[in-house]
Amino acid sequence: MAEAVLEVRDLHAFYGESHVLHGMNFSVPKGEVVTLLGRNGVGKTTTMRAIMGILGRCVGSIRHRGEELIGLASEKIARQGIAYCPEERGIFASLSVKENLLLPPVIRDGGLTLDEVYELFPILRERGASQGTKLSGGEQQMLAIARILRTGAHLLLLDEPTEGLAPVIIQQIGATIRRLRERGFTVLLVEQNFHFAATVADRHYVVEHGQVVDMIPNGEIAANEDKLKTYLGV
């Protein structure tokens, strides 16, 4: 396995008195696409929020390139080159597509230029003057991903990027994630759809009850399909 960009060890997280993560353990190797697979409510999104420092209380260790993140403010975590694309996308209704794209600051070298973003997502150039929330669901997802690529982030946290999208759009999102990997980005992907995950990822961590219960390399996913269906309830 390549050098780990992100290492999560014995991570516990809480919403108030509710104990949500119960000792998460996994690594994200540099240049790989890694998925957290699991049913709704098992702690996948909570894990991403913990990495970004937007949970009230976390115990354990989250190390990015060897530096501990627990206790750091969210803006300091982002400046290390970590970007989060939440499931709700967070498109600003009062801004055009282009204004949404230009809104996040460039925090590090290595971000994509606007032309490079448009090369990945040609529809965003065509719809540049449109109100952000007037886009289709698939176009909004493309905008949400595109927006973080300008910042210089090298580790991308993508939460359910295919949720509610038509199959043809899911294929486009998959092609984009594969191109990002080819460009050297590291991606942590939350997914329920393991058929989609198998088209983009290098390895899969299965999450149940706030813990990683299995790791399946992508090359072994077909041999483990029955087990995955049991884990995911499909």
Image: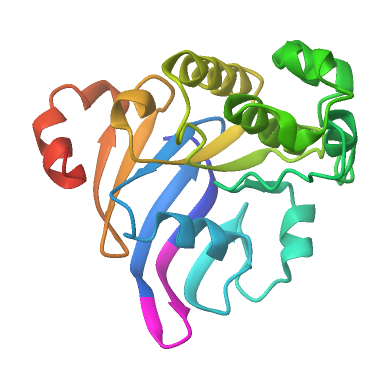
**Rendered position, 117 above or below 161:** above
Q: Quadrant of residue 94?
A: top right
Q: Identify the residue at the far front of this view.
A: 134
Q: Is residue 217 visible from the viewing direction of this image?
A: yes
Q: Is residue 100 magenta?
A: no
Q: Is residue 10 magenta?
A: yes
**In the image, residue 127 lies at what x, y percent?**
81, 19
Residue at 60% in and 72% down: 70
**In the image, residue 220 lies at what x, y percent?**
21, 25
Write the start and end of the magenta stretch as one range. Answer: 9-19
Q: Is residue 224 visible from the viewing direction of this image?
A: no
**Screen quadrant of the N terminus:** top left
Residue at 48% in and 43% down: 28
* 102 horizontally vs 121: left or right: right
Of residues 76 and 230, the one drawn nearer to the viewer in this rendering: 230
Residue at 37% in and 72% down: 20
**In the image, residue 52 lies at what x, y percent?**
63, 60
